[in-house]
Amino acid sequence: VSDPSKGKYNLEYYMKLADDLVEMGVHSLAIKDMAGLLTPKATKMLVSALREQHPDLPIHVHTHDTAGSGVASMIAAAEAGADIVDGAIDAMSGMTSQPSLGAIAATLRGTDLDTGLDQQDIAALNTYWENVRSLYAPFESGQLSGSSDVYEHEIPGGQYTNLLFQSKQLGLTEKWPEIKRKYAEANIVLGDIPKVTPSSKVVGDLAQFMVAQNLDAKDILDQAETLAFPDSVVNYLRGDIGIPPGGFPEPLRSKVLQGRGLEPINGRPGASLKPYDFDKERAGLTKRYGEKYITEKDLLSYALYPTVFEEWKDFEEIYGDVERLPTHIFLSPMVVGEEIELDLGPGFSQVVRLVSIGDVSETGTRMCLFEVNGEQTYVGVTDTSVEGAGAVREKAKGPGQVGSPMPGVVVSLKVKAGDKVKEGETVATLSAMKMETSIPATASGTVERVVVNVGDKVEGDDLMVEIK
């Protein structure tokens, strides 16, 4: 807002957007600063202008504290006339979370903007959440401090730690600084778009793809017809999530769609969405999993995220109703001699004690001896921490050899030996964390062999399909 070099998203842009929303009849205005880009100066400029233009409309400001200036920006918002500012309890605040609620309240105490929040009440809540957070230590991102370079790369707070974790899964940890730079570059390649779910995922997927393939903006445009872009990028350029401010980047969009034989979606994508047959899908899920295991929430989950839902049900079939496990037991393995009580329902509980853990077998399995209500039982557990030597996969080299563009897991195969394929046709789908990539045929011809299976882990350039 306060930086004239930032292009189309200036104060005039936001004022016009607010005016359009008010014209539609909104009851409040919310400033969603998902990356924490609002400096105190920019906050004052934007909130003051909105307050002057719309004196009777409530203004709500939300930010993230990635750069460390969140508290100062929220104070500036309050002083400029905002009615609501967001903060997080101290134990869960800072960095990519929201700024500290306790710090905001303490700073405003004794002023005309005093929140009325008691410091002792905040402290009691903070103690509770400190203990809760400690249970989830295995899922901490490893980020130790704020990062002021967010003003350059503009990665949203909710995505920053996810992207860091995904980069580790892709074997790109040492390239994290480059990924942040490529995020900024990918954003411009895609048209400098507002970055919030799902558009932020599109930018993040392209950034990781560019790093993994050693590509720059020129390469993306020059090779747009043939590159194995993540599905999210292709779907965005097709128009599946709507039209970005200023329209789609050209000629990138036309090249990507023409290279895949796709037609663009014009207008609001939901308008052309086919009706969803909930009764049919409910019947299918009930037949597959049993009526008592399919709730309304399950049906909606499947409608929105069918692959994720199926993965969860497969997990549940193996491990059962893990929601009944104490959090610390679910997140951290039991140690020999440890005893817990499981509450499995009204009047039904079990006392479980881990007696011993056997040596790992050639197949990677350990036999664990438990006592369940005093009775001994053996359970075979796969030790995923034990790595075998494994076979070295063949690498793709020739023009008819289709290789993996990055490390990941094969989630689907579209062809088998003997099938006829055309260059650019999807032959497999690869997944790396939340990013799915359609793998295109590198030549037209007949599939001679498929050397991977669904579920296989592959590294960059590993051979997947060979075409003659």
Image (spheres, rainbow, N blue to C red):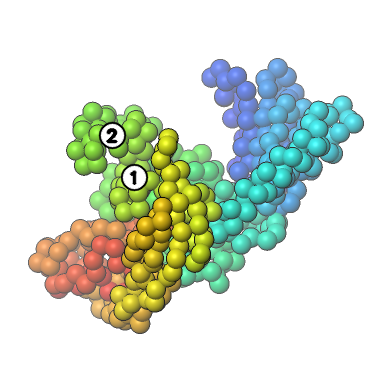
How would you rate the neighbour count of disc 2 (Cα within 10 Å): few for under 14, some for 14-19, many for 20 or more? few
Between marks 2 and 1, how big is the CA–CA gap?
16 Å
Q: Residue at x 56, y 17 (%)?
A: 25
465 is higher (above) or lower (below) than 311: below
| Rendered residue at 44%/55% (across/down) | 352
Could you tell me which quadrant the C terminus lies in? bottom left
Which residue shows up at 27% across the image and 54% down it? 260
Depth check: 348 or 196 in front?
348
Q: Is residue 300 left or right of residue 452?
A: right
The quarter of the rendered structure image containing the N terminus is top right
Q: Would residue 11 appear left or right of 282 to someone viewing this image?
A: right
Give percent across and percent down for residue 81: 77, 27
Q: Which mark is residue 292?
A: 2
Across and down, in percent, residue 360 comes to 37, 76
- In percent of width and height, residue 387 lies at 39, 77
Secondary element under disc 1, as helix, strand or loop, is helix
Q: x and y percent of residue 229 in the render?
A: 37, 58
Q: Which residue is mark 1?
A: 309
61 on left or right of 360: right
Dot 1 amino acid type = Phe
Q: Is residue 238 visible?
A: no
Give the crowd class for mark 1: few <14, some 14-19, many >=20 residues within 10 Å.
Answer: some
